[in-house]
Image (cartoon, rainbow, N blue to C red):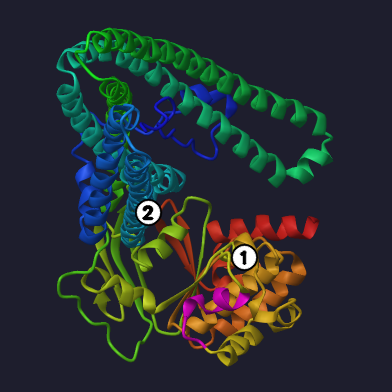
């Protein structure tokens, strides 16, 4: 009737990388001190008035039917067992009771369906809204906000909200109606007994609240321990080759045993608290009922009330006590829901640092592929004291191949980030085809750029979807043509289902060289005038590097190309080589000219070629 009031809180989900030794310090989702953040949740639910109306109707029906049952018991006992009732009277009495039970069953099914539907629909809508906003935010946002923590908000926090909408609010309304209606019925049945019962309710509520808080706290820790088990299993299974290579199976078994025992010990504490609370509540509830029945029996003996009245009073009293007991849990769950809603609202309300201007300037057509950096100075938001680029100036002509080299931290990758307008420089101007990036729509800018990253990022999808990611409407003929140019056709045709073959998480079904060639084919399908190659061959073996290099040469034809490379042997044919150090251009020219100049490039080349010869 009142639901399980001992363990209804939704525990905070720990982040996947929570370590066992830090489990006790892992914070639960914040408990808001106000219910105001839930306005966003209820505002989303308000978009479905029909389902809300049906859910409320079902709540009223079930509350009324629940209170009608003890009233019918009163009628049955007073009339059907009075000694003067005919079999027909008894049949009618029980038929009415069965009819109420049927109505209660149907109403409960309706209530469960519609409130559960609302909970799932609200969570789905909030997730969609948050995801849409996350896709608009620039990479700088994810430097300051961990994707793992965001993922936790999208899963554990939305699960709390689903519970609030799909269960907590329903429980609150149902028990409020039952409690108020039941109290009025008690006052009608026996005012004197009702006053005594109301005075005794706090004796039952206080231990429920006390133990309930402790059980919720232990439940949160229990969920953290369960998360530790999952995190441990994921960590060890993903590194099984290392575990077995170093013969650490026994030690990992011992570590896992400690994690499991920690989970069991926390569960034991929760069970002990729940057992204690259950015994105390049973003692108080049934002790109170016994006292009420004792007084009621005396009143029946005196002829003050009927036997049916005392039976209805006891049943209704149990319903009222259960209703108010459940309400003590509801407020805590609503506060947890408000905390979860506030965290999701932060993601929903975050504004993109890079946004289209109100009246974006159109890029010229057909595209030329020119790039211009003029006096650009840039600092990353996470490192405001260290300039990544300082007064950087570079003019790149259409169709020119520019190689960018320099030590780590020189600012090479920053150039790519700025070209794609993931960030805006604090000083200076960057132009594509003569149009400043800040005056153009970022989507138009990126539409003219194809990127081949260092690690050939692939998605958990089939080969076709990974290949056409740069041009979603590409036909299979276009895909195979790009794969052929990227030296990827042969291994793609050997896949079990061809282009329909699922490549695994991150493309794990392919080797590193194959992943990189898929990334090159993807860039070929993009067919953009500007090509960015971010150390596209740095992690490959010699054979894979040769195949990828051949694919890159095909990709670079007729395109403005910027190449970041640590292996200087791969950029000798570049039209110009830009040598960077500490965010500035320190040298530029051809490979031969820079080698003869004896500067930084010559030193880097000498060190690298000497090391490769020795190897």
- The residue under the point 43% across, 56% down is 411
The residue carrying mark 1 is 568
Does residue 359 belong to the magenta stretch? no
Residue 113 is labelled as 2
Does 240 sit above or below residue 368?
Answer: above
- Horizontal and vertical percent position of residue 386: 36, 44
**SS at circle 2:** helix
- Horizontal and vertical percent position of residue 422: 35, 61
- The residue under the point 27% across, 58% down is 51
Does 16 sit above or below residue 446?
Answer: above
Foreground of the two, 186 or 5? 186
- The residue under the point 36% across, 45% down is 95
Q: Which residues are magenta?
A: 463-474
Q: Quadrant of residue 78?
A: top left
Q: Earlier in the sequence, mark 1 or mark 2?
A: 2
For the C terminus, give its image quadrant.
bottom right
Foreground of the two, 586 or 99? 99
Residue 582 in view: yes
- Horizontal and vertical percent position of residue 533: 52, 70
Q: Main secondary structure of the magenta part?
A: helix
Residue 520 is labelled as none
Q: Nearer the viewer, mark 1 or mark 2?
A: 2
Q: Residues within 10 Å of mark 1 (few under 14, many from 20)?
A: some
Count of marks overlaid on the render: 2
How far apart marks 1 and 2 lie (CA) works out to 65 Å
For the N terminus, give its image quadrant.
top left
């Amino acid at each position: 009737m009142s639901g399980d009031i001992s363990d209804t809180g939704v525990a905070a989900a720990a982040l996947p990388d929570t370590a066992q030794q830090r489990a006790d310090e892992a914070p639960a989702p914040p408990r808001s001190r106000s219910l105001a953040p839930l306005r966003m949740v209820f505002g989303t639910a308000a978009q479905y008035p029909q389902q809300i109306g049906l859910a409320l109707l079902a709540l009223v029906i079930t509350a009324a039917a629940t209170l009608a049952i003890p009233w019918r018991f009163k009628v049955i006992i007073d009339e059907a067992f009075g000694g003067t009732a005919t079999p027909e009277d008894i049949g009618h009495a029980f038929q009415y009771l069965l009819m109420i039970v049927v109505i209660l069953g149907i109403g409960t099914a309706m209530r469960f369906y519609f409130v559960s539907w609302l909970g799932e629909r609200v969570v789905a809508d909030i997730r969609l809204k948050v995801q849409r906003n996350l896709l608009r935010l620039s990479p700088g946002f994810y430097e300051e906000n961990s994707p793992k923590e965001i993922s936790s908000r999208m899963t554990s926090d939305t699960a709390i909200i689903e519970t609030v909408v799909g269960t907590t609010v329903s429980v609150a309304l149902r028990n409020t109606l039952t409690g108020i209606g039941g109290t009025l019925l008690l006052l009608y049945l026996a005012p004197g007994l009702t006053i005594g019962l109301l005075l005794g309710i706090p004796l039952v509520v206080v231990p429920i609240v006390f133990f309930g808080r402790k059980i919720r706290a232990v439940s949160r820790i229990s969920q953290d321990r369960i998360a530790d088990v999952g995190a441990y299993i994921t960590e060890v299974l993903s590194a099984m080759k290392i575990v077995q290579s170093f013969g650490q199976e026994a030690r990992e078994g011992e570590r896992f045993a400690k994690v499991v025992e920690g989970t069991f010990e926390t569960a034991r504490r929760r069970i002990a608290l729940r057992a204690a609370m259950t015994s105390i509540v049973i003692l108080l509830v049934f002790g109170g009922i016994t006292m009420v029945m004792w007084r009621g029996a005396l009143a029946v003996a005196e002829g003050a009330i009927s036997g049916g009245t005392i039976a209805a009073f006891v049943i209704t009293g149990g319903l009222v006590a259960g209703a108010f007991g459940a309400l003590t849990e509801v407020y805590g769950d609503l506060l947890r829901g408000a905390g979860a809603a506030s965290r999701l609202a932060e993601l929903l309300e975050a504004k993109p640092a890079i946004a289209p201007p109100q009246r974006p300037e159109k890029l010229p057509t057909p595209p030329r592929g020119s790039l211009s950096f003029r006096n650009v100075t840039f600092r990353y938001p996470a490192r405001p004291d260290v300039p990544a680029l300082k007064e950087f100036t570079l003019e790149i002509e259409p169709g020119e191949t520019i190689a960018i080299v320099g030590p780590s931290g020189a600012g090479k990758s920053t150039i790519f980030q700025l070209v794609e307008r993931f960030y805006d420089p604090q000083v200076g101007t960057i132009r594509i085809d003569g149009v400043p990036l800040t005056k153009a729509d970022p989507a138009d800018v990126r539409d003219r750029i194809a990127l081949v990253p260092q690690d050939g990022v692939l998605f958990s999808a089939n080969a076709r979807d990974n290949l056409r990611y740069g041009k979603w409407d590409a036909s299979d003929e276009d895909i195979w043509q790009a794969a052929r140019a990227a030296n990827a056709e042969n291994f793609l045709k050997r896949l079990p289902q061809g282009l329909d073959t699922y490549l695994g998480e991150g493309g794990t079904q392919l080797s590193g060289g194959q992943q990189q060639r898929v990334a090159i084919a993807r860039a070929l399908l993009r067919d953009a005038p500007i090509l960015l190659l971010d150390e596209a061959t740095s992690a490959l073996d010699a054979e894979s590097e040769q195949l990828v290099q051949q694919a890159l040469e095909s990709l670079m034809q007729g395109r403005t190309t910027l190449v970041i490379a640590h292996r200087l042997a791969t950029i000798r044919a570049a039209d110009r080589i830009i040598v960077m150090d500490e965010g500035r251009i320190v040298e530029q020219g051809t490979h031969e000219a820079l080698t003869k100049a004896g500067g930084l490039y010559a030193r880097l080349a000498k060190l690298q070629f000497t090391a490769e010869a020795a190897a």
